[in-house]
Image: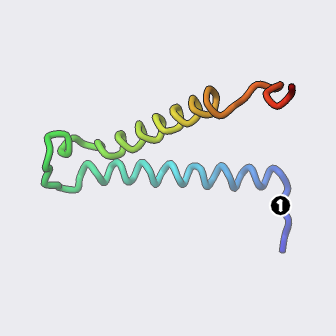
């Protein structure tokens, strides 16, 4: 097994990240060209489900961070008397 130095690791990570983004772009473009039979009016919009999923993830992250900050975190002297 060959060990990689930091520059090789960064190059591999950058390559995988670019490959991942290319896959996302390809899926979004395929969604435009695949014919669908929309049930609701917004189902027919191009890349609706991609944008909906992205906004849902962002909203989930914001809600979880807010809950963690104001509900779960306690002050430093919470357990002291």
Q: Is residue 2 above or below residue 19?
A: below
Residue pictured at 41% horizontal, 40% vertical: 56
Is residue 50 found left or right of 24 in the rendered image?
left
Could you tell me how many numbered marks the image carries? Answer: 1
Residue 74 locus on image (x, y percent): 72, 29
Between residue 63 and residue 13, name the one nearer to us.
63
Residue 62 locus on image (x, y percent): 52, 32
Locate residue 44: give its quadrant. Answer: top left
Residue 59 locus on image (x, y percent): 46, 34
Locate residue 41: give its quadrant. Answer: top left
Between residue 2 and residue 40, name the one nearer to us.
40
Q: Is residue 42 above or below residue 76?
A: below
Residue 12 locus on image (x, y percent): 69, 56
Neighbour class for label 1 at 10 Å: few (<14), some, many (≥20)? Answer: few
Is residue 41 found left or right of 25 in the rendered image?
left
Between residue 32 and residue 50, name the one nearer to us.
50
Residue pictured at 51% horizontal, 33% vertical: 63
- Taking the view exactly as shown, the residue that stands out farthest to the front is 81
Reading the image, the residue beneath label 1 is: 4
Residue pictured at 85% horizontal, 56% vertical: 5
- The scheme the figure's colours follow is rainbow
Q: Which quarter of the rendered picture does the N terminus lie within?
A: bottom right
Q: Which quarter of the rendered picture does the C terminus lie within?
A: top right
Q: Look at the numbered disc 1 and give the secondary structure of its residue.
A: loop
Between residue 65 and residue 13, name the one nearer to us.
65
Residue pictured at 82% horizontal, 31% vertical: 79
């Amino acid at each position: 097994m060959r060990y990689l130095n930091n520059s090789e690791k960064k190059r591999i990570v950058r390559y995988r990240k670019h490959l991942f983004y290319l896959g996302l772009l390809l899926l979004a473009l395929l969604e435009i060209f695949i014919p669908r039979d929309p049930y609701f009016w917004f189902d027919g919009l191009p890349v609706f489900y991609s944008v909906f999923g992205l906004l849902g993830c962002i909203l989930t992250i914001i809600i979880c961070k807010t809950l963690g900050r104001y509900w779960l975190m306690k002050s430093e002297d919470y357990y002291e008397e």
